[in-house]
């Protein structure tokens, strides 16, 4: 795991060392998460916030950057499924990943885009199991795939909406969810 964290940190340092001539963007967003698979068996629809830094590469439409996110999903009422399981628990998925993004639009127009991410994903489970309070965090390699569309508001500010699919491997292989986010990006 330390190797993965170092890889993400190295990607962040590279991103921050690019000359200021690059078209850099900071973004922040928020929205809903929809757990799937085993995660969806016990977690309700929740929320997520995300933010990061992107910069354009020499190729038109291609950008790279770093993305961080944090969310929360309350647990379903599992008492009826398994006596002793309480419904007051929650799970917090969060992580930091390197991003590669490609925009299809012309500058100053509506911009559809696709992106992929890879990096560190964590899953913190908190709740009561059979009357005992439990708090456990697992982490490992995670990835995201997504698509979105941006709408320019001014020369340096855009609003956007996007959908993401997040999944993990190893200790976080059960952490899978879709996110629907809306946000704001601006040049720095």
Image (cartoon, helix red, strand yellow):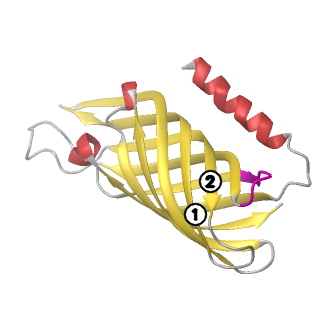
Residue, x 38% and y 31% (percent of image)? 172
Please name the residue that numbered disc 1 is placed on.
Answer: 113
Question: Earlier along the polypeptide chain: callout 2 or callout 1?
Answer: 2
| Mark 2 Cα shell of 10 Å, populated few (<14), some (14-19), many (≥20) | many
Instruction: Tell me, yes or no, whether the highlighted magenta stretch contains residue 59.
Output: yes
The answer to whether 58 appears left or right of 45 in the picture is: right
Please name the residue that numbered disc 2 is placed on.
Answer: 101
The answer to whether 23 appears left or right of 61 in the picture is: right
The local secondary structure at tag 1 comes to: strand
Residue, x 31% and y 43% (percent of image)? 89
Are the residues at dot 2 and dot 1 in contact (C-beta closer than 8 Å)?
yes
Q: Residue furthest front?
A: 59
Distance of label 2 from label 1 (alpha carbons): 7 Å
User: In the picture, residue 120 is in which quadrant?
Assistant: top right
| Residue 29 position in % (x across, y down) | 58, 62
The answer to whether 116 appears left or right of 80 in the picture is: right
Residue, x 17% and y 38% (percent of image)? 85
Q: Relative to the observer, which residue lies in front, 14 or 126?
A: 14
Residue 12 higher or lower than 155, as above or below: above
Instruction: Tell me, yes or no, whether the highlighted magenta stretch contains residue 79.
Output: no
The answer to whether 187 appears left or right of 110 in the picture is: right
User: In the picture, residue 15 is in which quadrant?
Assistant: top right
| Residue 177 position in % (x across, y down) | 36, 49
The local secondary structure at tag 2 comes to: strand
| Residue 121 position in % (x across, y down) | 49, 35
Disc on res. 176 = none
User: In the picture, residue 106 is in which quadrant?
Assistant: bottom right
* First to last magenta residue range: 53-60
| Residue 143 position in % (x across, y down) | 48, 40
Residue, x 70% and y 31% (percent of image)? 9
Which quadrant: the N terminus? Answer: top right
């Amino acid at each position: 795991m330390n190797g993965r964290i170092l890889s993400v940190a190295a990607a962040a340092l590279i991103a921050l060392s690019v000359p200021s001539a690059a078209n850099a963007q900071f973004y922040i967003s928020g929205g809903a998460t929809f757990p799937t698979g085993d995660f969806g068996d016990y977690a309700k629809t929740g929320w997520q916030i995300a933010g990061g830094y992107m910069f354009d590469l020499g190729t038109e439409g291609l950008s790279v950057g770093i993305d961080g996110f944090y969310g929360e999903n309350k647990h379903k009422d599992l008492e009826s499924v398994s006596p002793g399981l309480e419904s007051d628990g929650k799970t917090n998925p969060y992580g930091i990943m390197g991003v590669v993004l490609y925009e299809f639009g012309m500058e100053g127009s509506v911009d559809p885009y696709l992106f992929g991410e890879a990096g560190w994903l964590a899953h913190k489970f908190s709740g009561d199991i059979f009357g005992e309070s439990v708090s456990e965090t697992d982490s490992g390699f995670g990835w995201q795939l997504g698509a979105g569309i941006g709408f320019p508001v001014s020369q340096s500010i855009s609003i956007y909406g996007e959908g993401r699919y997040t999944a993990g491997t190893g200790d976080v292989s059960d952490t899978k969810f879709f996110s629907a986010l809306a946000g704001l990006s601006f040049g720095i």
